[in-house]
Amino acid sequence: MKKLAIILGIRPDLIRASLILRQLQEELGDRLIFIWSGQHYSDNLKDIFLRELGIRPPDIELSASGDTDAATVGSVVKSLFPVLLELDPAAATFLGDTNTVMGCLAAGQLNIPIVHIEGCMRSYDWRMPEEKYRTTIDHLADVIYTYFDEYKQQGVAEGLNPRNIVVVQNLIVDVLNAYYLDRLEYFDQMASPAFFVERGIEQGAYYLVTCHRRENVENPAILGNVMKFLGRVGLPVYFTASYRTQKNLAAFGITVPSNVNIVDPIGYEEMLVLMVNSRAVITDSGTVVEETAVLQVPSVQMRRATERPQVYDCRSSVKFDPSRPEAYPVEETMRRLDSIVGTTWEHGLGDGNASGRVVADLVRRLMEDDFRGHLPEYHHLKEEVARSAREDGLG
């Protein structure tokens, strides 16, 4: 039987796919090949997540890299192609919307079926490379696992075959159930007085911040607006900043407000403790706003548009657009945030069984050799072309 390849590359991939990887390992053993692109490579962006989430190390590391998105994507495709050529897996599985998912081009060039987990999500903000990436892989994919019916309808409206799209609900609910809600005593012990003293913050009296999206951190004016906003939120800010964000703050000469403490990226357990003990989280991360929705933590979403509108639907999040700060005055944004602090909501993101649904469907398809979503239509066309060529004396 052929093997199943899963290609991941950044820490949110590890979080969302953690239960899928563990369950597939149990089901498939050495028929599961876990490939790491190398997009994230340092201990605090990769290895600590493997340890804390109980994921075995990758079978293959591509060590793809680049100074630009183009160089990184090119490196992923170039490095992945010979690996897939040798493995010849039943399918190449990708998750999300990063540079790594563009490795699907290598799979497509080799005519290996492509599986996309977290498909059909759309922000309709075409500035975002992520929007282009997820649109591209969805239109190449043979099988798409999407979270909700509304996402499936977005894909169908673009011309995707509805038979290729499987609705599974949101993976993050499963992950938080397994790694946080089922281990509350452990996290309560982590959240000791010393934990907050060491970080110079007071429990419940700070904002946790992340900011990494290109549209926010690659533009000096927009990144400056983010820092001005943080300087006026009225409480200390604990900012776990990506290395790209830190580099650009220095390169652009942007002043860091006195209430903002910038630290390097941190592990998942520390992040969860900081999240649930904050007054609220301010972020441009899609994963984080879903985590806060599940964990009953209010959030401010620093985005022009989001592919995750459910966090607005359940009233766990309010919006601040740093590209148009005049439309979202700080005082009004914080007033709207204050209105949801201390409230509860039904997040509506899923029942906690999404990972199991993905695993069951992947295993079934592997056993039945049922990955080629484009196969019936493609073969019918191929046969017609071949017949016509023979009749014309060309075959």
Image (spheres, helix red, strand yellow):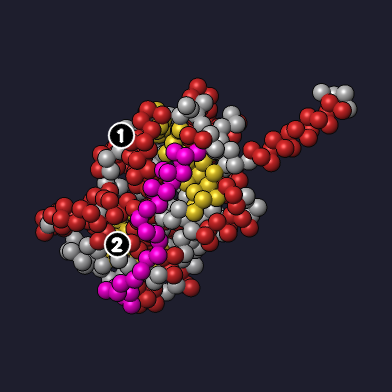
- In primary-sequence order, the first of circles 1 and 2 is 1
Residue 327 appears in the figure: yes
Magenta stretch: includes residue 358: yes
> What residue sits right under mark 2 in the picture?
295
**Residue found 48% across the figure and 34% down from its top:** 367
**Residue found 83% across the figure and 31% down from its top:** 388
Q: How many marks?
A: 2
Three-letter code, disc 1: Arg
**Residue found 20% across the figure and 53% down from its top:** 183
Q: What stretch is highlighted in magenta?
A: 338-365
Q: Nearer the viewer, residue 8 or 114?
A: 114
Distance from Cα at disc 1 to Cα at disc 2: 27 Å
The percent position of residue 68, horizontal first and vertical second, equals 49, 40
Q: Which of 67 and 356 is in front in this view?
A: 356
Dot 2 lies on which element? loop
Dot 1 lies on which element? loop
Q: Are marks 1 and 2 in contact (CB under 8 Å)?
A: no
The percent position of residue 212, horizontal first and vertical second, equals 40, 52
Q: Which of 168 and 81 is in front in this view?
A: 168
Q: Looking at the image, is 12 positioned above or below residue 111? A: below
> What residue sits right under mark 1 in the picture?
56
**Residue found 53% across the figure and 61% down from its top:** 150
Within 10 Å of disc 2 (Cα), the crowding (few <14, some 14-19, many 20+) is many
> Is residue 139 left or right of 230 when viewed as pictured?
right
Three-letter code, disc 2: Leu
Q: Which of 232 and 170 is in front in this view?
A: 170
Residue 232 appears in the figure: no
The percent position of residue 218, horizontal first and vertical second, equals 47, 51
Q: Looking at the image, is 281 positioned above or below residue 344? A: above
Magenta stretch: includes residue 282: no
- Image quarter where the C terminus lies is top right
